[in-house]
Amino acid sequence: MLVTVVSRHRHSATRLSTYLNVHQNRLEQLLRGGFLISADDLQIEAGDGCILIEGLLHCQGGIIVDVSKRIVFLEDEEDPLVQTVDYSYCVTLRNVGVICRYDSPHKDHQQDHHVHRYDVLDGDRDGKVEPIYEEDERPLLAEVVEEAAEWFFKNLARLQRDGLVSPGFPDS
Amino acid sequence: MTQRMRITDIAKMTESERTEALASLVSKARSGSAAARVAVSARLRAYEIRYEMTSEEMLRQFRAGQIRETADIAKWLFLIGARDCRVSA
């Protein structure tokens, strides 16, 4: 008997409707969790031959995730298979600086998926770049928000001491 | 005009509204509107004015390692990708 095994990776091509369903479900989970305050600025737009997803996710403590995604069609169906070809997820502490930024590969420079990490609370503006070679290590957008939450709660005492978040810290 | 929707609004749609909205989005993206091109060009132009160089010059300097990959530059690169999507597809 011949068995065909179809490998499904977390960043594989998927139907646009499925892609958006997963996206929305994860955002709703994050909103219910409370760290993500608003996803209302995140928009989907028809580009020229592609779809763009862009906007800000507003989180507790003045943390903002600036999302840029470009999605292309792999077929001509009405609900086509789509694939993300470019992305940038930039996590910023408002009025302070960038905490980290996940980027897709660039032509001729940083040709792997990579993340820039900054020691933002100590004024680091140069950061360190870490390549990401394994597909499973490339985060989904929701995982970037979860990482931002982890960073926030790990640094909360310092943020409060430095007056960067209010004691109640909802949106600081 | 470009077609743009909030992701959170899509979640509130009925199944049929959602199917119709996505079909329209896909159709507009496939056919490629002048409005979409103009919108991306305008955003690129804003970066070009702020940094006082063309997008092509930024790319040249970036590839030569003369420009640091900041959040602004990452966004600029993203927009160039959006502009050139049909070319590189």
Image: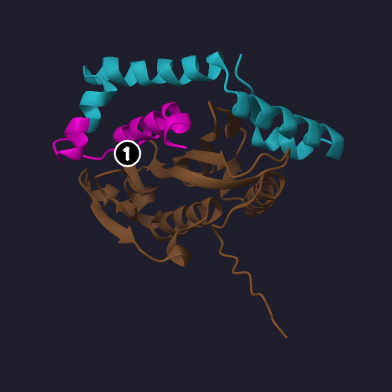
Q: What is the x, y in percent for residue A119?
A: 26, 52
Looking at the image, residue B34 lies above or below residue B13: above
Few, some or many residues within 10 Å of mark 1 (<14, 14–19, 20+): some
- What is the three-letter code of the residue carrying label 1? Val
- Figure check: A142 above or below A6: above
Q: Residue furthest bottom?
A: A1
State yes or no: residue B88 in magenta. yes
- In percent of the image, x 56 and y 50: which residue is there? A35
Shade representing chain B: cyan
Residue identified by numbered label 1: A96
Q: Give A28 or B52, whichever is nearer the viewer.
A: B52
The brown chain is A
Specify whether residue A166 is in view: no
Q: Please tell me whether residue A15 belongs to the stretch shown in magenta.
A: no
Rendered location of residue A33, percent (x, y)? 63, 54
The image quadrant of residue A77 is top right
A57 with respect to B62 (left or right): right
Residue closer to the observer: A132 or A94: A132
Identify the residue shown where x is 31% and y is 46%.
A162
Chain part drawn in magenta: B60-89
